[in-house]
Amino acid sequence: MLPWGGITCCMSAAALYLLGKSSGRDADILKSVTRLNQLKDLAQMLDTACKVLPFVVTVSGRVGSDTPINCEHSGLRGVIVEEAAEQHFMKQNDSGSWIQDSAQMLAMTKEVPWYLDDGTGRVHVLGARGATGLVLTVASETFEESGRSLVRGTLDYLQGLKMLGVKRIERVLPTGTSLTVVGEAVKDDVGTIWIQRPHKGPFYVSPKSIDQLIANLGIWARLYKYASLGFTAFGVYLIAKHAIRYILERRRLLDFQRRVRAAAAQRLEQDNDGTDGKAEDGPDVVNKDRIMPDICVICLEQEYNAVFVPCGHLCCCTTCSSHLSNCPLCRRRIDQVVRTFRH
């Protein structure tokens, strides 16, 4: 049987190692990206930058939009708005007790074209919802209790449900929020500058600064590395333990087979010398029978010490005999197991 515990630990260690390597690679990329102190300099840098390789930059500014969204519940103005509605209820489990649960009813997202503005220029951001590090602020969270209709309540109760109400959550990226964006800078035909996801490399939209992002990636890379080493050590321990146990069992089995073959060869030699002609109740026969090892035929580890009734065979230990219903030698049904003692 394979040591699945050790194999699983080693596979987890490999996954953690890849995650740590990816975090370290992203940190190195962020260290090498071009940093801009003022957005007005980006247009000139794009004109002089190489057109073959993607021009990855990091910029900072405040969120703005010409057509912001007016949030219905919170009253905020934002550029990305997510609305979700969850139905909360009590349900009856198999044991008859009531537990609280929820199910999502509605999930809707709105986004308008928006940009970063630092006072010197504007840079439009494209595809920010798929970027790493984007955090939307919980602008509104309300709970509406369900109506107390008698008919509806009776039907829900018969189905094992008790409706509690609907929870509505509104998340928004408000205008004026300070953000740091890391991505590929491009300029369209009309001269508008966009920052989008690079074909290769990280894409970040985060309220943290570039130095904070690099520091966090370094911390995660080290944590993944240490966790990978721990899982590797534990997995190797489990595999080595299983291998040592397997080797010891194989050595025990081979030793038992060697003893059986030696005993069989010695008995065959005695038979050829004419020892079969002696009296069956003589001491020589007793010594000859004692040549065979007194080991349980099931586990091949402990000495046999259990007699089966009514067949009378003595070939198993008490531990193995407790799991048997028929004698392994004659296949007769076992009515009783009697433990024997040598002294």
Image (cartoon, rainbow, N blue to C red):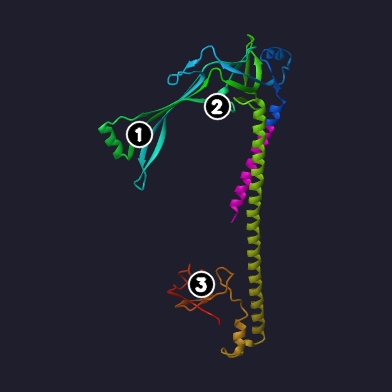
Helix, strand or loop: magenta stretch: helix
**Tag 3: amino acid:** Thr
Tell whether position 23 is magenta. yes
Q: Position of residue 340 (x, y in %)?
A: 51, 79
Between marks 3 and 2, how big is the CA–CA gap? 65 Å
112 relative to 6 in the view: left or right: left
Q: Which mark is residue 61?
A: none
SS at mark 1 in the image:
strand
Q: Residues within 10 Å of mark 2 (few under 14, many from 20)?
A: some
Q: Determine the residue located farthest toward the top in the rendered image.
A: 190
Of the numbered discs 1 and 2, the one sitting upstream in the chain is 2
Q: Is residue 197 above or below residue 255?
A: above
Q: Give residue 225's position: percent from left, percent from top.
A: 67, 41
Q: Which mark is residue 164?
A: 1
Residue located 61% across and 76% down the image = 293
The residue identified by callout 2 is 135
Residue at disc 3, secondary structure: helix
Which residues, given as a range, are shown in magenta?
1-25
**Discs 1/3, front:** 1
Q: Residues within 10 Å of mark 1 (few under 14, many from 20)?
A: some
Q: Find residue 159 and report its horizontal and vertical position in percent.
A: 31, 39
The residue at which mark 3 appears reads as 318
Under circle 2, the secondary element is loop
- As measured in the structure, the alpha-carbon distance from the residue carrying label 1 to the one carrying label 2 is 29 Å
Question: Residue 34: x percent and y percent?
Answer: 71, 21
